[in-house]
Image: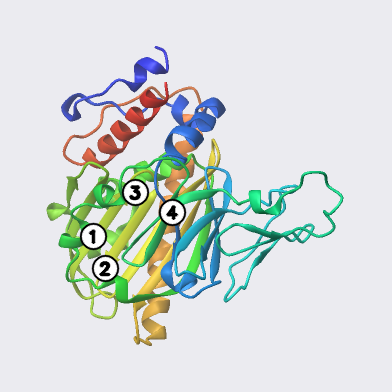
Amino acid sequence: MSIESELLPQALEDAFALPATFYTNPQIAARERDCVFARHWQLVAHVDQVREAGDHAIAEVAGVPLLIVRGDDGELRALHNVCRHRAGPLATCEGRGAKALRCKYHGWTYRLDGQLRSAPEMEGACGFDASAIRLPQARVAQWQNLVFAALESPPAITDVLAGIDARIGAHPLASYVFDRRTRYEIGCNWKAYVDNYLEGYHVPHIHPALNRMLDYRSYTTTLAPWHSLQFSPLESADALYGNGDALYYFIWPNIMLNILPGRLQTNRVVPLAPDRCRVDFDYFYPAGRNDAAHRTQDEAFSDEVQREDIAICELVQHRLASGSYTAGRLNPRRESGVWHFHEMYRAALRADA
């Protein structure tokens, strides 16, 4: 069966998982860069990183280095972090209060809005006009103090996130402050990691501690055009999260919001190779809450769950590449989130074709 025929829509009740080639084929990975990651929103920063003029953070979207910077005019921009001279970097780390953006290679200097201001010793270059040179810009959007960027024409961010504000009304995410970032490199395709995130079907078998905390019988998944929500009531000791709701949001194509009482964790899944990805975990807590012991416990529990997920995802990737696997049927009750993700993925690749 051809790759294109595998991209036809499927009904949930009849759905099969994606074939193994979509998790192993380098040509598929190259195609995804343009039709998935360049055309949709990516989580790139938090407002605390870029609150004042000259504050900046670095990111990368679909292979393009970006510089997220607050201008003198108060505008937030996502400039290409690629000097127009010979592709040097304007910044290699985040910073505060920069007055201009100076290339680390040859010193070409740009204003905070991306306009070239000066280029050392270029007087002898015939017809050289600094005023005609400007850094390209990606699109940028902000929600709940999270900053998103996209290279091409993405769906409106309000459409992508529609309904989330109403559902999380009791969680004041915009007032939470950044605490730390943890990164994991994983030996699996980025979609294998997303697939695993999108279903609680494996929780009783892979996550014993998490399974005790969640009510598996009440675990539900709801779908929206550009995101999905996995929900479970919490049965957690007061020392960890207490009682309340566990909300696990997936936002197409590779963003997760893990919302528990008193904690927001964002995940971004970054493809590194057909069989390798990186997941950036950022932790946020209510402003003014100085409870180091709770944060340490939260990080330890999250790391335990993550290590369990890494182990199974790497085992799955090995078997996807073995030549043995043919696409299996999805469980309509427990894997609707996986089906939803696969349908969005198929649609993105069909549009590219």
The circle on residue 268 is: 4
Local SS, label 4: strand
Mark 3 or mark 1, which has the lower sequence index?
3
Mark 4 or mark 3, which has the lower sequence index?
3
Cα–Cα gap, marks 4 and 2: 18 Å
Q: Amino acid at mark 4?
A: Arg
At horizontal 50% and vertical 29% (from top left) the residue drawn is 31
| Residue 124 to residue 326: above or below | below
Asked whether, in this view, residue 38 is left or right of residue 131, the answer is: left
| Residue 226 to residue 203: above or below | above
Cα–Cα gap, marks 1 and 4: 16 Å
Q: Which residue is mark 3?
A: 197
Local SS, label 3: helix
Q: Looking at the picture, tell me which residue is in the foreground, 84 or 322.
A: 84
Q: Which residue is mark 1?
A: 247
Mark 1 or mark 4, which has the lower sequence index?
1
Q: Amino acid at mark 3?
A: Tyr
Cα–Cα gap, marks 2 and 1: 7 Å
Cα–Cα gap, marks 4 and 3: 12 Å
Asked whether, in this view, residue 169 is left or right of residue 323, the answer is: left
Mark 4 or mark 2, which has the lower sequence index?
2
